[in-house]
Amino acid sequence: VTYVEVRPPAVAEALALLARYRDATRRQDGLLRCEIVQRIGQPGQLVVLEAWRDQTAFEAHTRAPLTGETREKLTAIRLAPIDQRLHGAFAVEGAAPTLAREAVYVVTHVDVIPPRKDDAIVALRRLAEASRTEPGHQRFDVVQQASRPNHFTVIEIWTDARAAQAHAMATPARDFRDALAPMTGALYDERFYRCV
């Protein structure tokens, strides 16, 4: 999960760079998925979502010339440092669905205090399982940060904004937020995106 924030006048340039990166990355051996999403209401905030078969494939990708070139060009137009967070699969679904054009991505960083990590794992797994049965569900993944195992990223895809809102109001999501409250280490950082 790589967060990129660029200057407002440079959004079109960043989108072109990332589209080229995505298309080239999709041809690399070992890639499972590569998606670029743009924050709704904040067009300069972008996220690159990548999944790789294994560490070897990921490392080969990081050494590819286009990877370095893209990072260098994005750095020149950025507002904030590029924030790449490496994760391991935790509660991840199988094959990627064919998405509706109106699909809404929700990317949430969940940070819990270290002694409550195992409690968070139980709550996150319960949320993922329940969410996958809801109307409008396209994908619901939870990944665990490699360098800080008490940090997680929840990646949701819903058919449209209405389905995403219905999920947020559903009992499993509310129960999860209640369970998370006494163990959280930071604000619940939920952001809404569209695929580009």
Image (tube, rainbow, N blue to C red):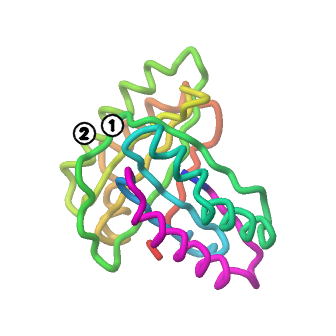
Question: Which residue is depicted at the point 45% across and 35% down?
Answer: 88
10 Å neighbourhood of mark 1: few (<14), some, or many (≥20)? some
Q: Is residue 156 left or right of residue 150?
A: left
For the residues labelled 2 and 1, the Cα–Cα distance comes to 9 Å
Helix, strand, or loop for circle 1?
strand
Q: Main secondary structure of the magenta part?
A: helix
The image quadrant that residue 45 belongs to is bottom right
Report x, y in % for residue 8.
74, 80
Front residue of 104 and 87: 87
Report x, y in % for residue 116.
52, 18
The image quadrant that residue 59 belongs to is top right
Q: Is residue 130 left or right of residue 11?
A: left
153, above or below 95, in the image: above
Is residue 168 visible to the viewer in this orientation of the structure?
no
Mark 2 belongs to which amino acid?
Glu
Region rendered in magenta = 3-30
Report x, y in % for residue 93.
26, 46
Label 2: which residue? 129
User: Is tag 2's residue or tag 1's residue first in the polypeptide sequence?
Assistant: 1
Helix, strand, or loop for circle 2?
helix
55, above or below 61, in the image: above
Question: Which residue is depicted at the point 55% across and 27% down?
Answer: 150
Tell me the tag on residue 91: 1
The answer to whether marks 2 and 1 mark residues whose Cβ atoms lie closer than 8 Å is: yes
Question: Which residue is depicted at the point 24% across and 69% down?
Answer: 98
153, above or below 65, in the image: above
Nearer the camera: disc 2 or disc 1? 1
Q: Is residue 150 magenta?
A: no
Report x, y in % for residue 171.
30, 44
Q: Is residue 23 left or right of residue 133?
A: right
